[in-house]
Image (cartoon, rainbow, N blue to C red):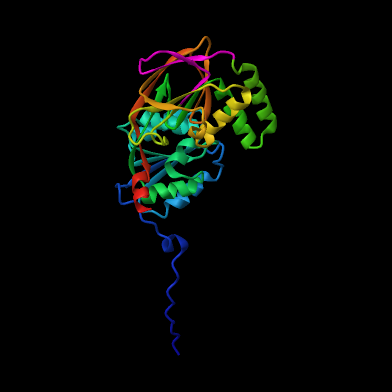
Amino acid sequence: MTDTLTPAEPTAPDDATAQARVLTPHVSIARIAVLVNPLSGSVGSRAASDVEAILADYDCQAEVVELSGETMDAQIDAALADAPDVLFVLAGDGTARAVASRAGANGPLIAPLPGGTMNMLPKALYGTTDWKAALRTALETGSPQFVSGGRVEEHAFYCAGIFGSPALWAPAREAMRTGKLDLAWTYGRRALRRAFSGKIRVELDGGKARKTEALVLISPMISQAMDDPVGLEAAAMNPIDAAQAFRLAANALFSDWRQDPSVVTRPARRIRIRARSRIPAVLDGEPTLLPHDMVVTFMPKAFRALAPDPAAAEDSV
């Protein structure tokens, strides 16, 4: 008696096959590079493998590089020189801004995923602080979008810049938000000691210099006052006390600060800011200290992002 083999029943496709994803029709994507910094605020040690698992759902060539502190600059330069169709950045806010700044208007498409603490730029582009959701959104619905911004010294910003003493409150506000109460108290005391130690002088597009406690510059990407990228939305603020300064600085970073009755805005392309001492600032959520005399310039086409077209999203509503 000869044994016969019963034909095997077809096996169900695995999850990757069953959930195969289609890349965006708005741009050709054949090669993807992803820079991952596992030490950044909200990334983690498993991020690189999680990225690879997600990219396996798409029909494209992908390279995932874990950034190392000692070689980070060289790794970024190498990724840009390789000219992938899209360069994703899963790292801190400063690293994402640095990559976008180096890429410029003629470099590869940049997709800064939310891997930092503030995540202002990724949230403005993708509307989420979930980097996995942002990655899939960019891959499936993204199109090339020019992002404008500002530049001061060697720093670029693409969402918002706060200049003057209220900027000192931003680190305290962020530490409080993340539950680091001791650090928030330290930052708060430091801000109180330095607050209102001197006004800044501001000149908008060569106009008359005016004194103010703080200046906020908002990029057209998130401005609700400008339909076209004609300049940075500028607002001078004069809070009457430390509590109001904290409110204005927090609103400028985390909500619609234009709702404040004391805020009046106008567009500007060249902004000179002066003070008697170095000027504290917050650029896209990151605090820094700038020279006492500086110029902020508007960049109408700072870099190209892979992000959903906001106009298309509005048309579909």
- Work out whether residue 264 or residue 222 is closer to the camera in this orientation and state it: 264
Residue at point 44% right, 71% down?
11
Q: How many dots with numbers? A: 0
Residue at image coords 44%, 32%: 159
64 relative position to 181: left or right:
left
- Please say if 203 is above or below 24: above
Q: Position of residue 206 (x, y in %)?
A: 35, 15
Query: Which residues are the magenta region?
Result: 197-216
Which residue appears farthest toward the front when viewing the image? 261
Residue 169 % position (x, y): 59, 26
Residue found 35% across the figure and 18% down from its top: 205
Image quarter in which the N terminus is found: bottom left
How far across and how far down the image is residue 60, in percent?
35, 50
Using the image as rendered, state which of residue 24 and residue 247 is in the foreground: 247
Side of 93 relative to 140 (left or right):
right
Asked whether residue 164 appears in the rendered view, the answer is: yes
Q: Between residues 249 and 147, which one lies in front from this camera angle?
A: 249
Name the spot of residue 9 as percent of width and height, x first: 44, 77
Residue 3 is left or right of residue 85, and the answer is right
Position above or below: 58 against 116: below
Q: Which residue is at the front of the view, 23 or 307?
A: 307
Does the magenta portion include 239? no
Say if residue 35 shows up in the picture.
no
Residue at the outermost bottom position: 1
Q: Residue furthest right?
A: 182
Is 209 part of what is drawn in magenta?
yes
